[in-house]
Image (cartoon, rainbow, N blue to C red):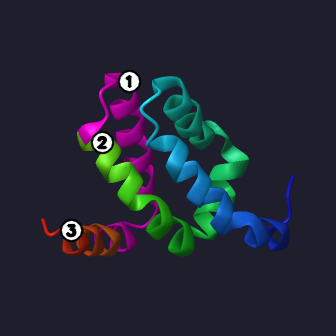
């Protein structure tokens, strides 16, 4: 298991890459990236650093939920968004408002 200090060092580039994979038009790439949230150890790390991670990936998750062509990917994306909402609804609402402001929605 990775230590929190090690995780913090790679967290930003890792989740920027994961957000790219999540948005992939190739459904298997997107699916595999979303399956990462089935790993309890990763979810614990993400939960501890959610204030830094969710803003990095929120846009990718939101767009995926609305626009991905594959229904399974949309469902998995919704589940990840729901997980973040349950972790910290206030942070989720902040990220949502910031995303909508940036996207002009």
Residue at x 21% of width, y 67% of height: 103
Q: Earlier in the sequence, mark 2 or mark 3?
A: 2
| Element on which disc 1 rests | helix
Q: Is residue 25 above or below residue 72?
A: below
Q: Position of residue 26 (x, y in %)?
A: 47, 27
Of the numbered discs in the image, which one, if any, rests on residue 65? 2
Residue at x 31% of width, y 52% of height: 62
Rounded to the nearest angstrom, the CA distance separating label 2 from label 1 is 10 Å
Q: Earlier in the sequence, mark 2 or mark 1?
A: 2
| Element on which disc 2 rests | helix
Look at the numbered discs 2 and 3 and tell me whether their residues touch, using CB distance below 8 Å: no
Classified by dominant secondary structure, the portion drawn in magenta counts as: helix
Q: Is residue 23 above or below residue 94?
A: above
Residue at x 30% of width, y 49% of height: 63
Q: Is residue 35 above or below residue 15?
A: above
User: In the rendered image, which quarter contains the C terminus?
Assistant: bottom left
Question: Which of the 4 image quarters holds residue 73?
Answer: top left
Q: Which residue is mark 3?
A: 100
Q: Which residue is mark 1?
A: 72
Q: Which residues are magenta?
A: 67-93
């Amino acid at each position: 298991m990775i230590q929190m200090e090690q995780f913090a060092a790679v967290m930003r580039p890792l989740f920027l890459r994961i957000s790219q994979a999540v948005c992939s038009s190739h459904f298997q790439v997107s699916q595999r990236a979303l399956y990462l949230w089935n790993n309890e150890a990763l979810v614990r790390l993400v939960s501890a650093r959610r204030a830094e991670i969710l803003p990095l990936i929120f846009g990718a998750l939101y767009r995926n939920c609305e626009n991905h062509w594959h229904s399974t990917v949309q469902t998995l994306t919704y589940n990840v968004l729901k997980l973040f909402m349950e972790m910290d609804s206030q942070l989720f609402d902040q990220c949502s408002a910031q995303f909508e402001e940036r996207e002009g929605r």
